[in-house]
Amino acid sequence: MIVGRQPRAFGICFGAVVVAYFAANIIGFCYKDFRLYTDSDLIERFIDVEIATHRAAIANTVQTPKDFIANYPDCCKVAAGQQALNWLMVVLGAGMRDVYLTYPLLIDENLRQYTVIYSTDCCAGVWAKRTDY
């Protein structure tokens, strides 16, 4: 009697693991780093990149992501990635999110509204970067 139930219990456990795996992929869990990158994590990561890239053109009072957000409170958002090819890519772990950073940047001695969009995968790797002045 017990022997007959083992395959059934195994099937249920296996099914639960598969469902949990795909659910974690959909919400953006990174198996490589074994952590979930939140929207705040992604925003701070790419603010650091922007500060390093445009150090001379960003206000001197901005040294950290927290300073950046304090100076530009409506600067940042994260949205479902526009680069994801289809729902199958999301389920298989290639789900992407777009990180939008908008802030004033000194370009050719003019202060312009600058928007950069980073398309990132579940492990915060950059797949694409687009800019708009």
Image (cartoon, helix red, strand yellow):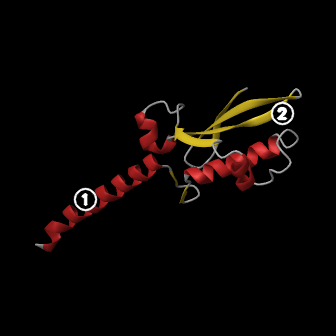
Residue at the image position 45 percent from the left and 49 percent from the top? 27
Residue 14 at x, y percent in the picture: 31, 59
Vertical position of residue 113 compared to residue 29: above or below: above
Residue 12 at x, y percent in the picture: 24, 60
Left/right placement of residue 77 relative to residue 19 reads: right
**Which of the two residues, 30 or 68, is positioned nearer the viewer here?**
68
- Describe the element under mark 1 as helix, strand or loop: helix
Please identify the residue farthest to the bottom as the structure is shown.
2
Residue 107 at x, y percent in the picture: 84, 29
Left/right placement of residue 131 relative to residue 16 reads: right
* Residue type indicated by callout 2: Leu
For label 1, the residue is 11
- Marker disc for residue 46: none
Using a 10 Å C-alpha cutoff, classify the residue at mark 1 as few (fewer than 14 neighbours), some (14 to 19) or many (20 or more). Answer: few
Residue at the image position 84 percent from the left and 33 percent from the top? 106
Left/right placement of residue 19 relative to residue 54 reads: left
For label 2, the residue is 106
Q: Earlier in the sequence, mark 1 or mark 2?
A: 1
Using a 10 Å C-alpha cutoff, classify the residue at mark 2 as few (fewer than 14 neighbours), some (14 to 19) or many (20 or more). Answer: some
Q: Nearer the viewer, mark 1 or mark 2?
A: 2
Residue at the image position 52 percent from the left and 31 percent from the top? 82
- Describe the element under mark 2 as helix, strand or loop: strand
Residue 9 at x, y percent in the picture: 22, 65
**Which of the two residues, 95 or 1, is positioned nearer the viewer here?**
95
